[in-house]
Amino acid sequence: MVSRAEFTRRRRALMEIMGSNSIAILPSAKEVVRSRDTNFPFRQDSDFHYLSGFPEPDAVLVLVPGREHGEYVLFCREKDPVRETWDGRREGQAGAKKNYGCNDAFPIDDIDDILPGLMEGRDRIYYEFGNHPDFDNQIMGWINSLRAQVKNGAHPPGELIDLSHILHDMRLIKSPKEIEIMSRSAEISAFAHIEAMKACKPGKSEMQIEATLKYHFADHGAQYEAYHSIVAGGENACILHYVENNMPLNDGELLLIDAGCEFEGYAADISRTFPINGKFSDEQKHAYEWVLKANKEAIDQAVPGNPWTAPHDTAVRILTQGLVDMGILKGNLDQLIEEEAYKPYYMHKTGHWLGLDVHDVGDYIEDGEPRLLAEGMVLTVEPGLYFSPKTKGLDKKWWGIGIRIEDDVLIAKKGNQVLTSAVPKEIDQIEAIMANR
Ligand code: GLY
Ligand code: MN
Ligand code: MN
């Protein structure tokens, strides 16, 4: 668990950057209806969680650097014995102070009366505009209520600054504790992938394999998936974010699993592809070997000082070489890359930042150039090849082969550490696991 001290350090670091005479305002996530009066499982907003650890909806975090009565203010739901009997426990204001370290806590229903007073006299508001349309209006309402008081000496803030940019730069570099949690998230996910490999056989359904993954996530203390698991048999693997997971698994086809748990808020994101019957066919093996080579050589490029695009450029080169070797593309390698001839078979990027969100925050471009990798960043490396029967002119022997091999890579002081290395990806390792279960 991230300690109270670390949450405090994060808020202090943010306030340091904001400077005095400013205020930051950040709302929690909201409950979302799934069906009539039942909600989706509540998931706290990642930015809100990063700064507070506070797990409830209907809350607003306010940071007021240098405020005499305390810099950290939280608005949250009041204790309510009846609602708590029906819907679950609430911290209330006392709990927010005692367990989450805010200096002041107020009922969320009093925010209109109190927040303008906290804004008054501050020059700048740090806020994530555009993410929460209702809240945008509330912010303007509070500013306007101060503007109406100017004749009485009120000083409304004159500048609105985007909070996400600063906060997301902080989130991009993981602390030692975050790395420890992400390693565990990767370890649990790796274990579940191996169990899924063992459970897979012709006649089972994608849904049953999804259940195996979910069982092992939860059995190891990860209550939720970091994203809806992709369990894609045969040509379903050519749909990049296939989540229906309701088809039978057929003998002779591949299964692509892209799944990771969320552990203590942090995502893992792993893809593996293996034969449903435990043995790769010649075509499957041929394509797989090129994706594997792309995965390994791209990972070698994920080192400090390299642009974040280096793994992608390497993967594209190797996959294009592979497509030529398989007889799918013909021509000069550089020209094929230049013309993006690989795109019908490899249409996505080779990775993304990973953290509290599976597609985590942080700019990819800095001063107009691809960002350079640095110690403490975590990114995925996920090359693939997708041979859909719908691809024009593609020899039938490749149809339905969809392969992605995805690992989570921590950029170290020197080189990198593959957090997901526990899931086998060599052909002989996969075949051995599936033969000996
Ligand atoms: N699981 C989604 C992705 O790999 O980006
Ligand atoms: Mn993935
Ligand atoms: Mn990914």
Image: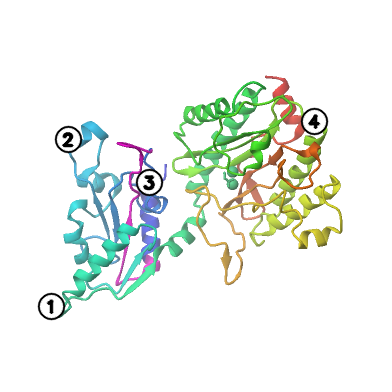
Residue in view at x 19 percent, y 60 percent: 112
**Quadrant of the image containing the C terminus:** top right
Region rendered in magenta = 16-40
Determine the CA span between mark 3 and mark 2.
Answer: 23 Å
Q: Which residue is mark 3?
A: 44
154 relative position to 17: left or right: left
Task: State which quadrant residue 256 falls in.
Answer: top right
Q: Residues within 10 Å of mark 1 (few under 14, many from 20)?
A: few
**Ligand 1 under 8 Å from disc 1 Cβ:** no
Q: Earlier in the sequence, mark 4 or mark 2?
A: 2
Residue under numbered circle 2: 81
Q: CA distance from mark 2 to mark 1?
A: 42 Å
The relative height of residue 169 versus residue 259 in the rendered view (above or below) is: below
Q: Amino acid at mark 4?
A: Ser
Residue at 65% of width from left, 47% of height from top?
382
Residue drawn 81% across the image and 39% down it = 286
Label 4 sits on residue: 281
Q: Amino acid at mark 3?
A: Gln
Q: Position of residue 25 (x, y in %)?
A: 31, 61
First reached walking from the N terminus: tag 2 or tag 1? 2
Q: Which residue is mark 1?
A: 152
